[in-house]
Image (spheres, rainbow, N blue to C red):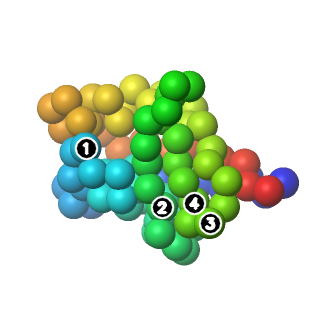
């Protein structure tokens, strides 16, 4: 497994689009950090990130809360988090 840090910047927040799986701030940051198209979507067990053709990863609780706040009113601060890739 490989650990990757994803940093959601102020630019990602400013360019992000609420309720758009491939254009939200977290998806923009993940796409940049991982070098490919990423999307964020919500399933029964919470928000997940789809990494191109790779398996989906359930996002940490703090990122789930970030996405909810971003979608509700856009008032969020930059954040970083780690994901484990196979």
Quadrant containing the N terminus is bottom right
4 or 2: tag closer to the N-terminus: 2
Above or below for 14 versus 53: above
Residue drawn at x 52%, y 25% as measured from the top left: 44
| Element at label 4 | strand
State the CA–CA distance, disc 4 to disc 1.
18 Å
The numbered dot on residue 51 is 4
Percent across and percent down for residue 61 are 52, 26
Measured as percent of width and height from the top left, residue 3 is found at 73, 53
C-beta proximity under 8 Å, tags 4 and 2? yes
Distance from disc 4 to disc 2, alpha carbons, whole Å, reads 5 Å
In the image, 11 versus 52, the foreground residue is 52
Q: Mark 3 points at which residue?
A: 53
Farthest-out residue, bottom: 35
Is 67 rendered above or below residue 28? above
Q: How crowded is mark 3: few (under 14 residues within 10 Å), some or many (20 or more)?
A: few
Q: Is mark 2 on a helix, strand or loop?
A: strand
Q: Mark 2 highlights which residue?
A: 38
Q: Distance between the residues labelled 1 and 3?
A: 21 Å
Mark 3 and 4 residues: CB-CB less than 8 Å, in contact?
yes
Dot 3 falls on a residue whose secondary structure is loop
Q: On the rendered image, what quadrant is the C terminus found in?
A: bottom right
Q: Pointer 1: what residue?
A: 19
Disc with the residue nearer the chain's start (2 vs 3): 2
Q: In front: mark 3 or mark 4?
A: 3
């Amino acid at each position: 497994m490989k650990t990757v840090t994803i940093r959601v910047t102020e630019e990602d927040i400013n360019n992000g689009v609420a309720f758009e799986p491939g254009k939200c701030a977290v998806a923009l940051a993940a796409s940049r950090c991982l070098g490919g198209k990423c999307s964020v979507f919500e399933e029964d067990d919470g928000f997940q990130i789809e990494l191109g053709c790779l398996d989906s990863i359930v996002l940490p609780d703090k990122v789930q809360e970030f996405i909810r706040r971003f979608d509700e009113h856009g008032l969020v601060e930059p954040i970083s988090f780690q994901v484990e890739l196979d």
